[in-house]
Image (cartoon, helix red, strand yellow):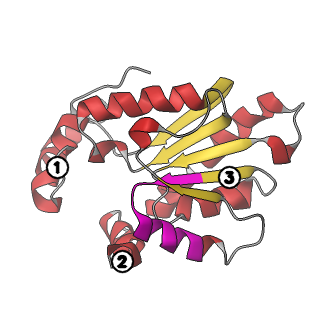
Amino acid sequence: MSANLYDLQVELLFNGTADAMRRRILAPLKQGLTGFSGISPRQIRVLDVACGTGRTLKFLRGTLPKTSLYGMDLSPAYLRKANQLLSEIPGELPQLLQGNAEELPYLDNYFHGVTSVFLFHELPGGVRQRLINECFRVTQPGGLLIICDSIQLSDAPEFKVMMENFPAIFHEPYYKNYINSSCDL
C-alpha cells in the first residue's frame, strides 16, 4: 500500500517540488556522461540506487533515451510499482533488481553513472558510508555518483530549528544524524 501512496506523500511533503528536486540530477549526469562519448549510448549504463517507484528512472529515460538503465530497491512492492510506471513510457524497460544496496550485486567498475535520490537521510551513518563505498566500487573510473537528498546543517544553518524538528514530526529516526554528518566522498 505504501508504494501506491509514496509519490503523493513525498510531493505533499516537499510542497510540490519533489520531482523538481529529482530532476536536478539530470543535467550533471548528462554532462558527465559526455566523457564517455566514444561509447555507443546503448552501452552506457546508469544505476539508480533505491529507485523506489521508478520516478527518477522515468526522468532518466526521458533525458537519456538510449542509455541502459538499472534500478535497485530493497522493497519488492516498490519495484512492482516502478515496473508498472516504467512500462507505460517509451524505450527499453530498465532492469530492476530487488536487493540491499549495502552489497550491490554488480561487478566493479560496471556503471558509467550511479544516482541516489532521497535515500541518504533514511540511513544510519555507517550504512551511508558503506553505500557510498559500494557506489564507488561499481562506478567506472571517470564515472559519476550523484546524490540528491535533504539539506544539512552545514548547507543552511538558518534552518536548524526546522531540520531538528523534522524527525519528530515525520518519524525520520536517522535524520538528525544525517543533518549533522558528512560522508567521505
**Circle 1 SS class:** helix
Depth-wise, is mark 2 or mark 1 nearer the camera? 2
* Residue 105 belongs to the span the image colors magenta: no
Image location (x, y in percent) of residue 29: 66, 40
**Circle 2 SS class:** helix
Q: Which residue is mark 1?
A: 162
Which of the two labelled residues, at mark 2 and mark 1, occupies the earlier sequence position? 2
* Residue 78 belongs to the span the image colors magenta: yes
In the displayed structure, 119 sits above or below 52; it is above
Q: Which residue is mark 2?
A: 5
Point 29% across, 36% down: residue:
152
| Distance from the alpha carbon under mark 2 to that under mark 1 | 25 Å
- Judge by depth and name the residue closer to the eye, 37 or 132: 132
Left-right relation of 2 to 57: left
Point 45% across, 61% down: residue:
52
Q: Quadrant of residue 132?
A: top left
In the displayed structure, 60 sits above or below 12; it is above
- Using a 10 Å C-alpha cutoff, classify the residue at mark 2 as few (fewer than 14 neighbours), some (14 to 19) or many (20 or more): few
> Which stretch did the figure color magenta?
71-84
- Judge by depth and name the residue closer to the eye, 61 or 82: 82
Left-right relation of 19 to 168: right
In the displayed structure, 153 sits above or below 51; it is above
Most common secondary structure along the magenta stretch: helix
Q: Quadrant of residue 120?
A: top left
| Distance from the alpha carbon under mark 3 to that under mark 2 | 24 Å
Which of the two labelled residues, at mark 3 and mark 1, occupies the earlier sequence position? 3
Depth-wise, is mark 3 or mark 1 nearer the camera? 3
Image location (x, y in percent) of residue 20: 51, 59
Amino acid carrying label 2: it is Leu
Image location (x, y in percent) of residue 117: 46, 49
Amino acid carrying label 1: it is Met
Q: Which residue is mark 3?
A: 69
